[in-house]
Every structure is written in structure tokens, then in C-alpha cells.
Image (cartoon, rainbow, N blue to C red):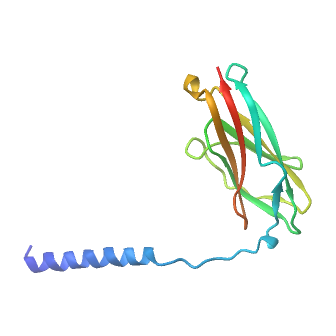
């Protein structure tokens, strides 16, 4: 190869690289969402304290109740937990989705669960205090996250003091 071909190839590579970086760095258009048009999920209790839980006694469970306080349906598009020691199940009317766990440890399905205006739903959080073995003693805090169409994600949290 002659030096002219190498220089042209290098210039073309740099042009493509910088062109790609320029396109990726451009601001993206902001999409505004009207929360009134997508329902409004509320939760009376977004945090629960299990207190002291024993590894030896096994799983502990808490149910969070959600209500659509909006005038149109609210749609849950995803649900996942913050740790592999926690699973969650969503129940609306007589249908359930889950148990669903932590991204990277289990598949996180795309959901399209509608909660009608005035309707309630339950998210059951199940915590396994023995999941982390002997190193898992002490204070823990975990979350269940629901991604909603047109709303900020809804986080349901709990705390426990894990004992052997």
C-alpha cells in the first residue's frame, strides 16, 4: 500500500468516527406525557418494615395495595426487584403476573397490565432472608419497581434486620 491510500483511509475512518460521535451527542427531542391521560397509580404505603426476620424461619411476605386515582386506565409495563433475594407478584382482579425477580438474574417480561380508574391492585413482595447465606445478616433494604406508561416509576420498598 502506498502512503496516499493509508492517509485517505485514516481520514475516512476519522470522519466516520467523529460523525458518529456527533450524531450520538445531539440532544434528543423531549416527549411530554400527560399523566392524566395515562391514569395515576397511588399507593397508601410505599415502605414496609419487617422488623427482625430469621434466616431459619424462611420467607417473609408483604402486600402493597395500589389504586388508580386517575380518570383513565393506568398501564404497568414492567416490574422488577432490586435484588435476587426478592420476588414480586402483581395481581389485578383475578389475574396475576409473576413471580418476577431482579434483572440479570431472571428474565424481566414486558407487561401491559391495565388498572382501570378506581380499581385496586396488589404487589406481593416476597423476601428470602437466607438468600445471601451467613454474610447476609444485618439491616437490608430492597425495592420493587413498577414501570408505568406515562408516569415516573413507582418504587415500593421494605426493610428488615436479618438474623441467623
Please name the residue shown 39% across and 78% down the image: 22
Instruction: Give the percent coordinates (x, y) of residue 69.
Output: 88, 62
The foreground one among 16 and 141 is 141
Q: Residue furthest right?
A: 118
* Quadrant (top left, top right, bottom left, bottom right) of the N terminus: bottom left
- Quarter residue 141 falls in: top right
Q: Is residue 40 left or right of residue 141?
A: right
Please name the residue shown 72% across and 74% down the image: 33
The answer to whether residue 128 shows anywhere in this view is no
- Quarter residue 101 falls in: top right
Q: How many marks?
A: 0
- Quarter residue 88 falls in: top right
Q: Is residue 15 left or right of residue 136?
A: left
Please name the residue shown 90% across and 57% down the image: 119
Instruction: Give the percent coordinates (x, y) of residue 55.
Output: 67, 22
The foreground one among 23 and 111 is 23
The answer to whether residue 125 shows anywhere in this view is yes
When the figure is inspected, residue 60 is found, relative to residue 65, above or below; the finding is above
Instruction: Give the percent coordinates (x, y) of residue 144.
Output: 70, 47
When the figure is inspected, residue 93 is found, relative to residue 17, above or below; the finding is above
* Quadrant (top left, top right, bottom left, bottom right) of the C terminus: top right
Q: Is residue 1 left or right of residue 133?
A: left
Please name the residue shown 77% across and 34% down the image: 61
Amino acid at each position: 500500500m502506498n502512503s496516499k491510500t493509508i492517509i485517505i483511509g485514516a481520514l475516512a475512518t476519522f470522519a466516520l468516527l467523529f460523525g458518529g460521535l456527533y450524531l450520538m451527542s445531539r440532544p434528543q427531542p423531549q416527549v411530554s406525557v400527560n399523566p392524566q391521560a395515562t391514569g395515576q397509580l397511588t399507593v397508601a404505603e410505599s415502605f414496609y418494615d419487617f422488623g427482625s426476620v430469621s434466616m431459619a424461619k424462611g420467607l417473609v411476605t408483604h402486600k402493597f395495595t395500589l389504586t388508580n386515582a386517575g380518570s383513565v386506565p393506568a398501564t404497568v409495563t414492567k416490574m422488577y426487584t432490586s435484588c435476587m433475594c426478592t420476588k414480586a407478584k402483581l395481581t389485578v382482579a383475578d389475574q396475576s403476573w409473576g413471580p418476577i425477580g431482579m434483572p440479570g438474574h431472571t428474565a424481566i417480561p414486558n407487561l401491559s397490565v391495565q388498572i382501570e380508574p378506581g380499581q385496586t391492585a396488589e404487589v406481593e413482595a416476597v423476601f428470602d432472608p437466607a438468600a445471601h447465606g451467613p454474610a447476609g445478616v444485618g439491616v437490608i433494604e430492597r425495592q420493587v419497581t413498577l414501570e408505568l406508561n406515562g408516569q415516573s416509576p413507582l418504587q415500593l420498598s421494605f426493610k428488615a434486620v436479618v438474623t441467623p
